[in-house]
Image (spheres, grey):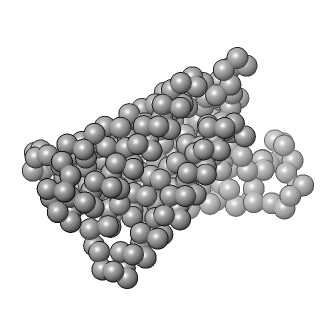
Amino acid sequence: MPPLARWYIKLAMLYFIAALIVGVAQAVLDLPYLGPAYVHMLVVGWITQMIFGVAYWMFPKYSPETPRGDDAVAIGTFCLLNAGLLLRVVVEPLRAWRPDAAPGWLLVVSGVLQALAAIGFTLNTWPRVKVR
Amino acid sequence: MPRVSAWFIRASLCHLLGGFTLGALLLASKGVSLAPGVWSLRRVHIEMLLVGWIIQLVMGVAIWIFPRFVLRSAPRRSVVTAWLAFALLNSGVILVTLGASFVALGRIVEAGAALSFAAHLWGRVSPAGLSAM
C-alpha cells in the first residue's frame, strides 16, 4: 500500500473515533451546536477519506510510469481535504457557541479547500476509471 | 473494469464535485451573508453526496470486483439489471433534487435501483474459490 493511502486510511480511522467521541459529548453534555461537526467528521473525515485512500491505492493504474496519476495533485488533495475539514470542525462550533469567537471568512476558506480537494481527487481519479 | 462500473464511478465523481461545491456554498453562508435562498440547496447537497457519491461509488465498485459469472452461463439479464440500476439511481437522485414534490417519486425510483442492483449482484455473492473469472 502506498504511503499516501496509509495516511488517508489511518486519518479516516482517527476521524471515525473522534466523530463518535464528539457524538457522545453532544448527547451527554447537550451541545447541539456540535451536530454539523459530528456529521461531517463521519461523512467527510471517515467515509469520503477512506474512499479517497482506497481508490488511490486500488484503482487501475494510470500508466506504468505514473501508476497513481499526478502525485503532487494527490498529496495536494489530501492536504486540502484535511485542512478544510479541520478548519470546519474547529471554527463552526466556535461560531455557533459565540459568533465573535472566530471570523466567518474562515468558513469560506474551509469550504473552498474542501471543494478544491474534490476537484483534485476527480482530476486524478477520472483517467484511472478504465473500461476493459 | 466493466463499462457499467466505469459509468457508475464517473457519475459518482460528478456528484462528488457538485455536492462539495454546494457544501462549500452552504458552509460559506454560515460565515458571511449570501443570498437567503442558499439553504434551500441543503437537500440537494445531502442527496448528491449520500446517494449520488457514496452509494453510487459503492455500487460501481461492487459490480466491478465481485466474483463474476462464467461468460457462457452469464444470463443476459445480469448486464441489463446493472444498467437499469445505474439509470434508476441517477434518475432518482435528479428527481429528489428537483423539489419537495418530487421527493417521494425519486425515492421510489431509487428503491427500484436498489432492487435491480440486488438482482444483479445476488448470484455473485458466492463462497471463496467459486468465482469463475
Instruction: Tell me if residue B16 can be seen.
Output: no
Vertical arrangement, residue B26 with respect to residue B119, above or below:
above
Quadrant housing residue B6: top right
Between A37 and A87, the one nearer to me in the picture: A87
Q: Position of residue A62 (x, y in %)?
A: 65, 24
**Residue found at x 86% / y 58%:** B128
| x, y percent for residue B57 | 54, 47
Horizontal arrangement in the rendering, residue B119 relative to residue A91 (left or right):
right
| Near-viewer residue (B55 or B119) | B55
Q: Residue furthest top?
A: A65
**Residue visible at 28% across and 39% down?**
A109
Q: How many numbered discs sit on the rendered protein?
A: 0
The N terminus of chain A: image quadrant: top right
- Residue B75 vs residue A30: left or right? right
Name the residue furthest bottom. A28
For residue B52, above or below residue B101? above
**Residue B128, placed above or below residue B68:** below
Q: Does A83 sit left or right of A49 as displayed?
A: left
Considering only vertical position in the picture, is A37 above or below A51?
A: below
In the picture as drawn, the residue positioned furthest to the right comes out as B129
> Residue at point 52% right, 48% down?
A49
Name the residue at 68% across, 56% down.
B121
For the question of whether residue B28 can be seen, the reply is yes
In this rendering, would B118 be left or right of B53?
A: right
Image quarter of residue A93: bottom left
Instruction: Find residue B133 and report its horizontal and vertical position in percent.
Output: 84, 43
* Image quarter (top left, top right, bottom left or bottom right) of the C terminus of chain A: top right
Q: Nearer the viewer, residue B104 or A56?
A: A56
